[in-house]
Image: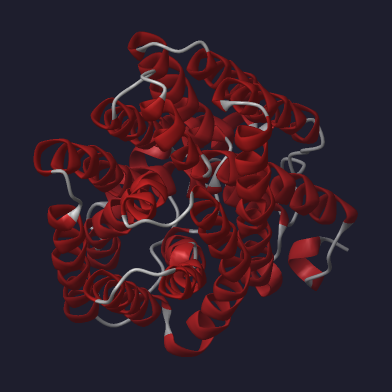
């Protein structure tokens, strides 16, 4: 009997879930640990804070622009070769960062890693798992995948700081490039559901799916609010380590904070998946944006200490990737899994435009004023706007749009 008919955890689904969880964990762990390199690279004169911030902004923009295309390719042809090739790009990007110099940093840390993350993150991997899971267990499988993916930061961030302290920033980047190579082997485990099987998704039609999505009010509202998610999270991932050093705390606190974000992220993602089934995707998204913004406002207004930083990291970690279950559930509920990668990519482009501005403007404001005050205030304003937009504009849960 098929997975679709029985809701069973088939060997193909379990294998894909393990492979996708490992890839997502490594991809997110590596990317979210890059902020640890800002202070040592700036101190060594390799790049300025503004250059580092702009490279991370370019990375997020490349990720956002590449995401719809990577998702559409994987929807149509499967994810094995795309994900494996992206893992190679990931390692090459980290190696170029280690070579030093602004051009290599922009090309490697910006463009190559951005495109690599587009094929090794949620937009592609959630789609692979969704097409193998039945509707009865699809939400659970996606929540498990998102939770597993968050654990990478818990392990990679402290390991990265250890390598920086033990060797130097160049050696640490080389070590991360070796970790990126592990994703290639895991990608070879992916299998597509047989065409015509009861559990197989309809044939993808990216153009018609995008046209249908752009006329869906819940989809458009969630896409606009998703801008704030990228703006807030990438500012924090990129600039929090440097910010707490400026406040007089040791760099190890930044690594610990990033690790705590990853650990709490796993629990928060599972809780969000549970709440979506009870309250609905739109309500959970609005609540996440509101709680994130309140946590940011409290951290900014209170004195910065080791304790306040770790409490802030735990709160943000609980809310970090908790948007994945409601966003994935909304797309799947409205349009089904056939074009998930394409539609997630369209929505995610708004997220990455916000991420581009969060990383870049954070570095620019510091370069011009010597502080991050403007950046923190912008996070609060944008987050409150997103919470209001999602709460008042999301509307009731929409009926599913018939597939093309």
As drawn, the residue found furthest toward the front would be 248
Residue 56 spot, x, y in % from top left: 36, 33
Instruction: Check the image and report above or below for 378 versus 27.
Output: below
**In the rendering, at what x and y percent does residue 282 appear?**
34, 76
Residue at x 79% of width, y 62% of height: 3
Q: Is residue 363 left or right of residue 121?
A: left
Examine the rendering and report whether any part of residue 138 can be seen. Answer: yes
Along the viewing direction, whichever of 205 and 221 lies nearer the viewer? 221
Q: Identify which residue, 1 or 67, lies in the foreground.
A: 67
Render colour scheme = secondary structure
Furthest toward the bottom, the residue is: 278
- Tell me: residue 266, above or below residue 55: below
Residue for point 83% across, 61% down: 2
Left or right, residue 115 beside residue 198: left
Which residue is more in the foreground, 249 or 32? 249
Pick the front one: 50 or 152? 50
């Amino acid at each position: 009997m098929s997975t679709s008919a029985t809701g069973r955890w088939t060997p193909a689904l379990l294998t894909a879930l393990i492979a996708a969880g490992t890839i997502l964990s490594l991809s997110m762990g590596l990317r979210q640990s890059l902020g640890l390199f800002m202070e040592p690279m700036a101190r060594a004169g390799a790049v300025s804070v503004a250059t580092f911030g702009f490279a991370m902004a370019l990375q997020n923009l490349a990720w956002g622009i590449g995401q719809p295309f990577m998702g559409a390719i994987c929807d149509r042809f499967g994810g094995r070769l795309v994900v494996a090739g992206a893992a190679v790009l990931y390692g090459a990007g980290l190696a170029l960062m280690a070579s030093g110099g602004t051009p290599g940093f922009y090309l490697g840390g910006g463009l190559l890693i951005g495109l690599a993350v587009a094929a090794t993150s949620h937009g592609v991997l959630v789609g692979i798992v969704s097409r193998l899971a039945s509707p009865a267990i699809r939400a659970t499988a996606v929540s498990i995948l998102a939770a597993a993916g968050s654990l990478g930061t818990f392990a990679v961030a402290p390991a990265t700081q250890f390598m920086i302290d033990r060797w130097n920033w160049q050696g640490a980047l080389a070590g991360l490039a070796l970790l990126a190579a592990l994703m290639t082997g895991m990608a070879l485990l992916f299998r597509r559901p047989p065409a015509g099987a009861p559990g197989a998704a309809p044939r993808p039609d990216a153009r018609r799916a995008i046209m249908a999505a752009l006329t869906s009010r819940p989809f458009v509202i969630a896409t606009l609010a998703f801008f704030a998610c990228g703006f807030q999270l990438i500012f924090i991932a990129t600039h929090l380590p440097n910010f707490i050093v400026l406040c007089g705390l040791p760099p190890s606190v930044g690594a610990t904070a990033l690790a705590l974000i990853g650990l709490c992220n796993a629990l928060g993602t599972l809780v969000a998946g549970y709440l979506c089934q009870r309250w609905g995707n739109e309500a959970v998204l609005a609540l996440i944006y509101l709680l994130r913004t309140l946590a940011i406002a409290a951290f900014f207004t209170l004195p910065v200490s080791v304790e306040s930083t770790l409490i802030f990291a735990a709160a943000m970690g609980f809310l970090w990737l908790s948007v994945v279950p409601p966003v994935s559930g909304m797309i799947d509920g409205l349009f089904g899994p056939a074009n998930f990668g394409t539609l997630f990519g369209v929505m995610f482009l708004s997220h990455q435009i916000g991420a581009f501005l969060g990383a870049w403007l954070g570095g620019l404001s510091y370069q011009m004023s010597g502080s991050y005050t403007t950046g923190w205030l912008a996070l609060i304003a944008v987050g409150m706007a997103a919470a209001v937009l999602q709460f008042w504009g999301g509307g009731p849960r929409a009926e599913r749009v018939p597939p093309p």
